[in-house]
Image (tube, rainbow, N blue to C red):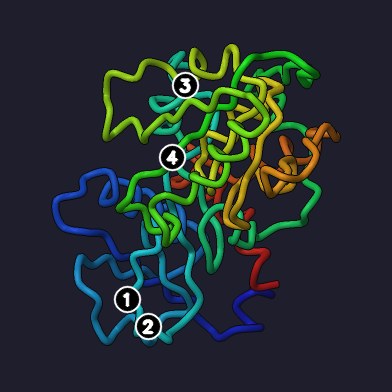
Amino acid sequence: QRLGARIGDVMRAFLYFERGKPHQLNAMRSMAMGLARHGVHCDLSREWTASALDATFVVCWGSKVPHIWSGPKQLILEAGYINGRSGDYHQDRLQFISAGWDGLHGRADPGAPARPPSDRWNALDIKMEPWRHGVGDHWLICDQHPGDTVAPGDPQWWRGADTLAKAKGIEAIYRPHPLLAPDLGPLRDSLAKASRCITWSSTCAIESVMMGVPTVAMDRGSIAWEVCSHSVSEPDFFGSRRDWGYSLAYRQWTSEELADGTMWEHMRYYFE
């Protein structure tokens, strides 16, 4: 009631999903159920229509809002981050749905206080491996899908890292996005002997950091930005990862948590 009084008698959400993307439709259906439990009126659509302009906020998947859009606030969903317990990082991401306001990953507002408690992290049952100091014999460069909405403008952004590695007498191994090279094998195997992992804003930085591999994230949009160095010429980051882990666990949700309103109870603080 207090929330409604501040921004209008009835909150309205416009939920957009792309044609032929069942994972988006399923997420939006779950989201609509959870919002309805909190008295939010929802419109689901696979087209951007004028009714979106009357919404309190819009929900979409992966920054698919039209570039000309100048309407209400945006709640952006994407694949989750960690520990769906499949044993495979990319399959794990499909077990959760990440959410953030007005941006993707590191550029998103998480909605709630910046220092959440440890409960969700503990439930994931993940142990951070100690930082590696002087371990490994090469740098691993992890590229992104060229069609990614947060891909760098220069498709060869990693050339500087490769050049610096050679100047230092270090081997640099390039790893393309797994959708472009499905026979790569698990990311964890590629990281096993790496002394450093270099990314633009790829979510592979999450697994790298948790394995204790010093990691470079060159773009502020990286979800691991705060626990990485930001240039190949900077010293490696070896600081605390605790608060980052707690926050990460509060940035992803199951479909059930979308449907029962748990996720919205967290995300609605953005308006308050």
Q: Is residue 32 in sight in this rendering?
A: no
Dot 4 amino acid type: Asp
* Residue 185 sits in quarter: top left
Q: Is there a contact, CB below 8 Å, between mark 2 and mark 4?
A: no
Residue 218 relative to residue 174: left or right: right
Task: Name the one closer to the observer, 245 or 112.
Answer: 245
Circles 2 and 1, Cβ within 8 Å, touching? The answer is yes
Position of 225 with respect to 134 (left or right) is: left
User: Reading the chain from its start, which is encountered first: label 2 or label 4?
Assistant: 2
Q: Amino acid at mark 3?
A: Leu
Residue at 77% from the left image edge and 45% from the top image edge: 234
Give the secondary structure at mark 3.
helix
Q: Which residue is mark 1?
A: 66
Which of 267 and 252 lies nearest the eye of the viewer? 252
Percent across and percent down for residue 40 are 46, 68
Neighbour tally class for label 4: few under 14, some 14-19, many 20 plus, Cα within 10 Å: many
Choose mark 4 or mark 3, whichever is in front: 4
| Marks 3 and 2, the one that precedes in the sequence | 2
Crowding at mark 3 (Cα within 10 Å: few <14, some 14-19, many 20+):
some
Image depth: mark 1 or mark 4 in front: 4
Q: Of residues 73 and 231, which is closer to you in this image?
A: 231
Q: Quadrant of residue 77?
A: bottom left
From the image, state whether disc 1 or disc 3 is nearer to you.
3
Q: Is residue 189 left or right of residue 241?
A: left
For disc 2, the marked residue is 69
Three-letter amino acid code at disc 1?
A: Pro
Q: Which residue is mark 4?
A: 143
Residue 176 lies, with reference to residue 131, above or below; the image says: below
Q: Which residue is label 3 attached to?
A: 187
The amino acid sitting under disc 2 is Trp
Helix, strand or loop at disc 1? loop
